[in-house]
Amino acid sequence: MLSAKADKKNESTYSYGKKSRDGIGKFYMGREISQVMGHLGAGWLERPKREQEERTDLLVKNMQLKPTDVVADVGAGSGYFTFRMAELVPKGKVHAVDISPQMLGIVRAKMRSLKATNVLPVQSTIKDTKLPPGSIDCVLIVDAYHEFSHPREMAESISRALRVGGRLILIEYRKEDPSVPIKLLHKMTQEQAIKEVSQVGLAWKETLDVLPQQHFMIFEKQAKKK
């Protein structure tokens, strides 16, 4: 949890300006933060063609999860990736983190129907994942970071939750590629993403070129220097 002093300092890192059609008029490191897709977008997340269009199967495969891993799906939405990961960590667990009670309601319904005992729904806030410090091996964020109204605070919360050596896998549509049919504010360049995430002690390790439309960026939590 951030102190009032740290909270005030972080807020000063944001700027405000004219809101574009798909933005909120709030800027972080030169990037306008986009509007949020709410629970009414759950159908789009679960669309039948998603695996074919985005190769979500390759995304999960390239996470290289171990059976005992403790994973967090931040911005889990309807749990599309949550339950795919849960199958791969039978001796671990998956925290399905979302700010929307309605989305978490969908996750809970799936837990019952799939009898998924290693999934834990977590209600986050706009600034805090509510994950225990030093408890997570891998955090996955798929097409959600660009919507965080407080990206600095959320990145700090994720960094606290990761164990040393733990990974953040950040998936965002490639803004560098005009052929990717997504609104501009819902895409990010690799350069911008690395610039933002590296502010909180997460070091960029590599970007895998395995997905047809998205960056697959891997960051690692570094040990604090003595």
Image (spheres, rainbow, N blue to C red):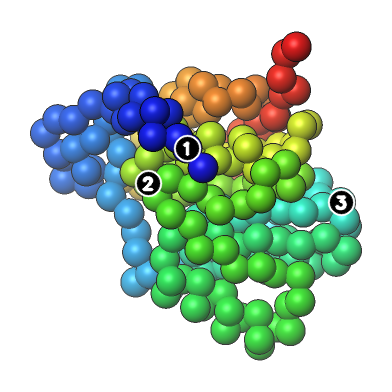
At a point 51% along the width and 72% down the height, the residue shown is: 104
Q: Horizontal and vertical percent for residue 41?
A: 37, 67
Does the CB distance between marks 3 and 2 fall below 8 Å? no
Q: Nearer the viewer, residue 51 or 129?
A: 129
At a point 66% along the width and 86% down the height, the residue shown is: 112
**Amino acid type indicated by mark 3:** Lys
Q: Secondary structure at mark 3?
A: loop
- Label of residue 66 in the image: 3
At a point 70% along the width and 83% down the height, the residue shown is: 114
* Mark 3 or mark 2, earlier in chain: 3
In this view of the protein, can residue 35 be seen by the observer? yes
* Mark 1–mark 3 distance (CA, rounded to whole Å): 31 Å
Q: Which residue is mark 2?
A: 147
Q: Which residue is mark 1?
A: 2
* Disc 3: CA contacts within 10 A as few (<14), some (14-19) or many (>=20): few
- Above or below 120: residue 29: above
* Mark 1 or mark 2, earlier in chain: 1
In the displayed image of the protein, which residue is found farthest to the top?
226
Q: Horizontal and vertical percent for residue 204?
A: 64, 24
State left or right for residue 224 relative to residue 189.
Answer: right
Q: Secondary structure at mark 1?
A: loop
At a point 32% along the width and 54% down the height, the residue shown is: 36
Q: Nearer the viewer, residue 161 or 52?
A: 161
